[in-house]
Amino acid sequence: MAEIHIIGEVDTAKDFRKQHLFCKWYIQIGNNWRVLSGKKEGQTQVASTEFEDICRWSYPIDLHLATSGIQGWPKLYLQVYHLDWLGRSHLFGYGLLTIPTLPGQHDLDCYTWRPVGTLQEKLVQFFLGGGPQLKNPLMILSASDRRKINTEAMGVVSFKITVIFRNFFDYGVEYN
């Protein structure tokens, strides 16, 4: 089987309007793929943007996958949360990033967004926290479902990822 190694880190977050952020990430793969080693999901520590405009996580990603076909290429799905002054976590943004199809080192930026609610929901969010969330967060993996959502931009999560291919030529997959 052809194999791919994804090694890197969830590096930083910037341009978010709140402090005390953390990120949950998941690797979404198709039916032709299986995990040989590593974790398909993780969560960073809480980091503060109190003294600078960048939240630094440097949280490691190390995943080894095998595939019998390239359908269902890996995508990195993430959710950014912030802790309020009471220690409650609130979903602050969604993001989706396709793992590069070329081997080598990649610096990637994932632009995040969140659903926009009604005026009443915005008032509740301002005074009580929280905000609108997707009933099925995995619907952002489908472009046709995603375009129906009214959203606002939140911030940018940066990744440093190295992609290593193995046995792709042996199985007839070429890349340039």
Image (tube, helix red, strand yellow):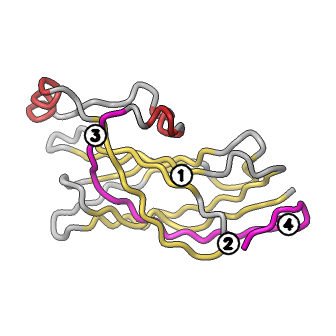
Along the polypeptide, which appears first: circle 4 or circle 2? Answer: 2
The numbered dot on residue 57 is none
Q: Is residue 173 magenta?
A: yes
The quadrant of the image that shows the N terminus is bottom right
The numbered dot on residue 76 is 1
The image position of residue 38, as x and y in percent, is 66, 55
Q: Residue sitting at 84 percent across and 50 percent down?
A: 68
The image position of residue 123, as x and y in percent, is 9, 29
Q: Quadrant of residue 11?
A: bottom left
As drawn, 148 above or below 80: above
The amino acid type of the residue labelled 3 equals Ser
Which of the pair 63/164 is nearer the observer?
164
C-alpha separation, residue under disc 2 versus residue under disc 1: 16 Å
The numbered dot on residue 89 is 3
Provide the residue span drawn in magenta. Answer: 149-176
Judge depth for marks 2 and 3 and give the one in front. 2
Which residue is under mark 4? 167
Mark count: 4
As drawn, 10 above or below 42: below
For the residues labelled 2 and 1, say whether their Cβ atoms are less than 8 Å apart. Answer: no
Q: Is residue 170 magenta?
A: yes
Indicate left or right for 73 with 90 as reference.
right
C-alpha separation, residue under disc 2 versus residue under disc 3: 36 Å
The numbered dot on residue 103 is 2
The amino acid type of the residue labelled 1 equals Leu
C-alpha separation, residue under disc 1 versus residue under disc 4: 23 Å
